[in-house]
């Protein structure tokens, strides 16, 4: 896909997210905990399980993540994992939001 | 459900001779059929609603089914019992008539779905953890067989579990790229046939209405795997290989589902993976005959039972929309906006109406499939899968 088209896709995707999801939109302004928690449970949850106990993807429970740097986890969220179904979320999330999710998972406050 | 299911009967007495009236009185007050009933999964609560598609409302609620964040169901041949497969490995036999749990076991740590044999005697469940398929007696839920999905890499996650004629189940191995056929026609010890090298990372499968063709979608490559069960021995071959060659795949935020053979005339519709497209495939040659551009990455592409239209819902971020495709032209003829997070689409058996779950609006909506008019809304808590009892009579559902 040409760069311009790719840019359009991103813009459209982002615009749709703003419309469909965001009480206080993703990728702009400070992270919105409620919206991000829902994203983790419902959207990450389609592969990692709604309670994060795993599914097609691995579990995201504290035991697995302990010892990892929040920045490392945030990069996985933003860039995905090549050769696996983990997609890059950069078109939909800001760095601050990815970091918020990383800390949320590490805190073990995940439901 | 707290109260017994009301409704029904009251006929009879006035019509019958007096001598028969005592027998009529002895009939249970709740006597009714289940052909127009179904269940809706309330995923966050581990609960089910029992719905009546004639009344277009919920007539009962069942709690205590564990983690239903990814759940599906099949029905007994008499349409009375639903077998519900939960994410946490729970297998629950639900009595739809009395809206109660008849039996429940937790048979694995993490599972994805199941199937019922053509004779209604066996329930099979595909598990992620521990990877493999377990088979249970449909009456008692006692374990009948355990088929660990062992390959050189260990135990594979299994999915795409479908039933076909002759007490056979087919399923695919996510890690190993294989499709296995477990044949229970000779009793409760299965004969297992392993088809290897079917493709990279099969993520889901469907079986044709005839039970003849098993198609597994592949996440790891552009293409699908087809098994023709009328051929002996059955072999897997690639179809639509390289359907997106040279094109950039979009990030996949939700795996599509291949639930049913969305057969529309002489071709059928499949959701493309990583593309905003529906693929049209010739039902005889299995070659691509067209594509429809749609507004997002499709999750379900479900044909009306008459084949006239295909209804499509989408992954995040287009998950508030349904597009309806004309199966003759492939064009989008209607776009609906049911609300945030449209998760599932289920047609009534004659296809006159369709039930749609809208998770984040907390409702299930009922549409007329000819006028696209919304006929009813039923409140439900985070509704996801909708399963109508008429599935009992279809292979692969």
Image (cartoon, rainbow, N blue to C red):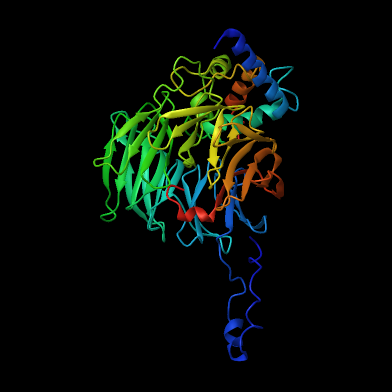
Q: Nearer the viewer, residue B69 or B159?
A: B159
- Horizontal side of B329 relative to B209 (left or right) equals right
Residue located at (45% from left, 52% from top): B394
**Can you say whether B352 is above or below A45 in the image?**
below
For this view, does B394 lie left or right of residue B155? right
Q: Is residue A60 left or right of residue B42?
A: left
Query: Is residue B311 visible to the viewer in this orientation of the structure?
Result: yes
Measured as percent of width and height from the top left, residue A31 is found at 70, 21
* Residue at x-position 59% and y-position 35%: B325
Q: Is residue B131 visible?
A: no
Q: Quadrant of the N terminus of chain A?
A: top right
Report which quarter residue B277 is drawn in: top right
Q: Residue furthest bottom?
A: B19
Quarter residue B132 falls in: top left
Question: Is B63 rendered above or below residue B148?
Answer: below
Compare residues B8 and B209 and report the one nearer the observer: B209
Residue B267, percent from left and from top: 46, 37
Q: Is residue A78 left or right of residue B106?
A: right
Q: Residue furthest top?
A: A3
Instruction: Give the total of numbered labels.
Output: 0
Coordinates of residue B165 in the picture (x, y in percent): 34, 51
* Residue in view at x 58 percent, y 71 percent: B31
Residue B359 picture location, percent across and down: 65, 40
Report the quarter where the C terminus of chain A lies: top right
Whether residue B45 is situated above or below residue A88 in the rendered picture: below
Name the one closer to the observer, B103 or B343. B343
């Amino acid at each position: 896909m040409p760069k311009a088209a790719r840019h359009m896709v991103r813009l459209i995707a982002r615009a749709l997210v703003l419309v469909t999801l965001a009480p206080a939109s993703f990728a702009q302004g400070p992270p919105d905990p409620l919206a991000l928690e829902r994203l983790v449970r419902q959207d990450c949850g389609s592969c990692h399980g709604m309670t994060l106990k795993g599914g097609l993807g691995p579990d995201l429970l504290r035991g697995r993540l302990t010892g990892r740097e929040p920045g490392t986890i945030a990069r996985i969220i933003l860039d995905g994992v090549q050769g696996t179904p983990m997609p890059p979320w950069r078109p939909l999330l800001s760095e601050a939001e990815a970091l918020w999710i990383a800390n949320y998972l590490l805190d073990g406050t995940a439901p | 459900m707290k109260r017994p299911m009301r409704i029904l009967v009251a006929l009879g007495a006035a019509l019958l001779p007096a001598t028969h009236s005592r027998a009529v009185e002895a009939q249970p007050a709740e006597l009714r059929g289940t052909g127009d009933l179904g269940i809706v999964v309330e995923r966050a609560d581990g609960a089910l609603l029992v719905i009546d598609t004639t009344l277009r409302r919920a007539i009962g609620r069942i709690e205590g089914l564990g983690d239903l964040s990814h759940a599906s169901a099949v029905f007994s041949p008499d349409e009375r019992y639903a077998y519900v497969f939960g994410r946490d490995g729970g297998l629950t036999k639900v009595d739809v008539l009395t809206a109660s749990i008849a039996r429940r076991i937790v048979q694995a740590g993490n599972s994805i779905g199941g199937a019922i044999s053509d004779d209604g005697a066996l329930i099979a469940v595909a598990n992620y953890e521990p990877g493999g398929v377990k088979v249970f007696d449909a009456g008692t839920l006692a374990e009948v067989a355990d088929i660990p999905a062992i390959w050189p890499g260990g135990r594979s996650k299994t999915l795409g579990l479908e039933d076909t004629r002759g007490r056979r189940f087919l399923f695919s191995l996510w890690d190993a790229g294989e499709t296995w056929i477990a044949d229970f026609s000779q009793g409760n010890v299965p004969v297992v046939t392993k088809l290897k090298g079917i493709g990279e990372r099969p993520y889901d499968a469907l079986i044709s209405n005839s039970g003849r063709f098993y198609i597994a979608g592949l996440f790891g490559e552009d293409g699908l795997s087809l098994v023709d069960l009328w051929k002996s021995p059955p072999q897997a071959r690639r179809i639509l290989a390289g359907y997106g060659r040279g094109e950039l795949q979009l990030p996949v935020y939700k795996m599509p589902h291949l639930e049913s053979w969305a057969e529309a005339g002489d071709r059928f519709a499949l959701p493309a993976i990583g593309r905003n497209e529906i693929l049209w495939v010739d039902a005889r040659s299995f070659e691509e005959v067209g594509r429809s551009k749609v507004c997002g990455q499709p999750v379900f592409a479900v044909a009306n039972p008459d084949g006239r239209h295909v209804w499509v819902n989408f992954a995040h971020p287009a998950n508030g929309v349904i597009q309806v495709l004309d199966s003759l032209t492939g064009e989008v003829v209607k776009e609906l906006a049911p609300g945030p997070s449209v998760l599932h689409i289920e047609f009534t058996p004659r296809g006159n109406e369709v039930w749609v779950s809208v998770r984040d609006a907390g409702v299930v909506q009922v549409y007329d499939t000819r006028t696209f008019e919304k006929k009813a809304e039923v409140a439900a808590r985070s509704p996801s899968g909708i399963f109508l009892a008429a599935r009992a009579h279809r292979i692969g559902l």
